[in-house]
Image (cartoon, rainbow, N blue to C red):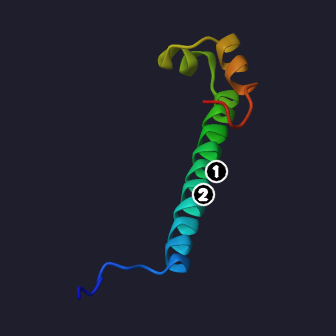
Amino acid sequence: MAIDTIFVASDARSRRSLGATLYRAWLACHAWAIRRRTRHALVEMTEEQLCDIGITRSEARREIGKSFYWD
């Protein structure tokens, strides 16, 4: 008779997947917050700074107008 030493209780497995799901959700929210912050930083930039990064004022406005979850 063999003893199964790799057995994991189903409730432990669901906790682990719940933790992983929550972590992925946190990562997505964090990425959205960074995108939002960097998009709104475009508002503060001068024409010369925008030119340095290679975008125009109209492109910056279009970027700022995107939804927070937009890639």
Secondary element type, mark 1: helix
Type of residue at label 1? Cys
The mark found on residue 26 in the picture is 2
Q: Is residue 67 left or right of residue 52?
A: right
Which residue position holds label 1? Answer: 29
The mark found on residue 40 in the picture is none
Q: Position of residue 58 (x, y in %)?
A: 70, 11
Q: Please, is residue 52 above or below residue 25 in the view?
A: above
Comparing 9 with 66, the one in front is 9
Residue shown at 62% from the left, 16% from the top: 47
Comparing 36 with 41, the one in front is 36
Question: How dense is the environment of label 2, judged by Cα within 10 Å: few (below 14), some, or many (20 and up)?
Answer: few
Q: Is residue 20 left or right of residue 66?
A: left
Q: Residue 6 occupies which quadrant of the picture?
A: bottom left
Q: Please, is residue 54 above or below residue 8 in the view?
A: above
How far apart marks 1 and 2 lie (CA) works out to: 5 Å
